[in-house]
Image: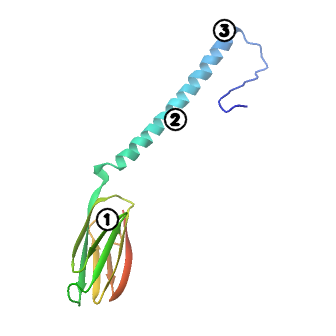
Amino acid sequence: MPKNKLSIDLNVELTEKQRQRLHKAIHKTISAHLKKTETASVKKERKTARSLTADNVMKVNLDASFTNTNPGLSELKAILNDEEKTITESGKISFDKVQSGDIIIIQGESLGKTTVTIDVSAEPIQFNFEPGNFNGNFFID
């Protein structure tokens, strides 16, 4: 049977008027169901569109501190999606278009200790690395 075809075998004789009323009732019920489904779909699309608006986009700052080493002898690279930023001494890295659910990857190396802190709700909120190579991920809440 085709997907959009409805067949009902009532095993009852209907007058033309009864058949028309039944047809109208079925049509009304199906139309109402389609309208509900369409409304739910539109609401979902609106919610998705809203989640991509400026209201849900935030600026994030990473504060990096290299201790027990001279400036320029360390490197921290932060990556958000396709955007990559690098610093070689203590300072900040900022990203402007961060959303909940994003992941900021950090990686680098230092001859001294490295502390990296994020200024928004994230997991974790801070990393403390010993001298050497390091990497981690901030999961934005």
Residue 85 placement (x, y as % from top left): 29, 70
Residue 71 placement (x, y as % from top left): 20, 85
* Image: 2 above or below 11: below
Decide: few, some or many residues near mark 3? Use Cα within 10 Å; few <14, some 14-19, many ≥20.
few
* Image: 58 above or below 6: below
CA gap between label 3 and label 1 equals 65 Å
Q: Are marks 3 and 1 in contact (CB under 8 Å)?
A: no
Sequence-wise, the earlier of marks 3 and 1 is 3
Q: Residue at 63% x, 14% y: name it.
A: 21
Q: Residue at 79% x, 20% y: name it.
A: 11
SS at badge 2: helix
Q: Residue at 68% x, 26% y: name it.
A: 6
Where is residue 122, by image quadrant? bottom left
Q: Is residue 62 visible?
A: yes
Front residue of this view, candidates 113 and 119: 113
Q: Residue at 36% x, 63% y: name it.
A: 82
Q: Mark 1 is on which residue type? A: Ser
SS at badge 1: loop
Residue placed under numbered mark 3 in the picture: 17
Residue 1 placement (x, y as % from top left): 73, 31
Q: Mark 3 is on which residue type? A: Lys
Q: Are marks 2 and 1 in contact (CB under 8 Å)?
A: no
CA gap between label 3 and label 2 equals 30 Å
Sequence-wise, the earlier of marks 2 and 1 is 2
Q: Mark 2 is on which residue type? A: Thr
Indicate left or right for 117 with 22 as reference. Answer: left
Observer-side mark, 3 or 2, equals: 2
Residue placed under numbered mark 1 in the picture: 121
Residue placed under numbered mark 2 in the picture: 37
Disc ID at residue 54: none
Sequence-wise, the earlier of marks 3 and 2 is 3
CA gap between label 2 and label 1 equals 36 Å
